[in-house]
Image: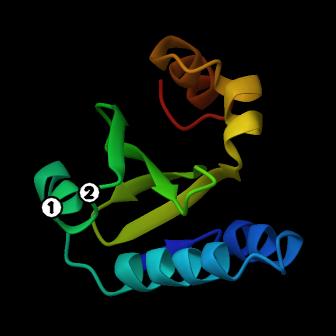
Amino acid sequence: MDLLRKDKLIKLKKKNRGNIKLSMAIDKLIFDIENSNWENKFDVIESRPDADKVHSENIFFFNINIHRTLILLLFDEDEAEVLWAGNHTLYDKTFKGNKKTIETWLRNQGKIK
């Protein structure tokens, strides 16, 4: 699977350079996505138990590391696109922990109709 906007994950990794566990978790997430053959949400969740489907358009949050850094990905056949990456505090500030706010954010980004 091709991973688009991987630069967002690399930026997060650089920002937290001293956090080895986070760096390893980011590398593992990138590896898992790029080497996956996921066809549906069940494949994703089976492969990555930290995945949480937040929208019917195959949009997931992934918790990585104990810091609850979250990654939002949009899967489209053989592609995944990183839409958002940040820590749990930024997640709460941006998405307020509810699916309606996530849906509004996705709509404002032009990712859903």
Query: Could you say which quadrant of the image residue 52 lies in?
Result: top left
Left or right of residue 14: residue 43? left
Name the outermost residue toward the top: 100
Verify CB contact (< 8 Å) between mark 2 and mark 1: yes
Q: Name the residue under label 2.
A: 49
The residue identified by callout 1 is 46
- Estimate how packed mark 2 is, as few (under 14), some (14 to 19) or many (20 or more) residues with alpha carbons within 10 Å: few
Dot 2 amino acid type: Pro
On residue 4, which mark appears?
none
Residue under the image location 67 percent in, 40 percent down = 88
| Residue 18 or residue 54, whichever sits in front | 18
Q: Where residue 42 sits: x, y (%)?
A: 12, 52
Between the residue at mark 2 and the residue at mark 1, the CA separation in whole angstroms equals 6 Å
- State whether residue 1 appears in this view: no
Circle 1 packing at 10 Å, graded few (<14), some (14-19), many (20+), is few
Q: Which residue is drawn at 73% across and 74% down?
A: 7
Locate residue 88 relative to residue 78 in the image: left or right: right
**Helix, strand, or loop for circle 2?**
loop
Q: Where is residue 57 in the image (x, y as percent from the top left)?
A: 33, 37
Viewport quadrant of the N terminus? bottom left
Residue 82: x and y, percent?
58, 59
Q: In this view, does 67 lie above or below 27?
A: above
Q: In this view, does 62 lie above or below 5?
A: above
Please give left or right for residue 47 compared with residue 85 in the image: left
Residue extending farthest to the right is: 15
Vertical arrangement, residue 103 with respect to residue 35, above or below: above
Can residue 69 be seen in this snapshot?
Answer: yes
Residue 2: horizontal and vertical position, in percent? 44, 79
**Numbered disc 1: secondary structure:** helix
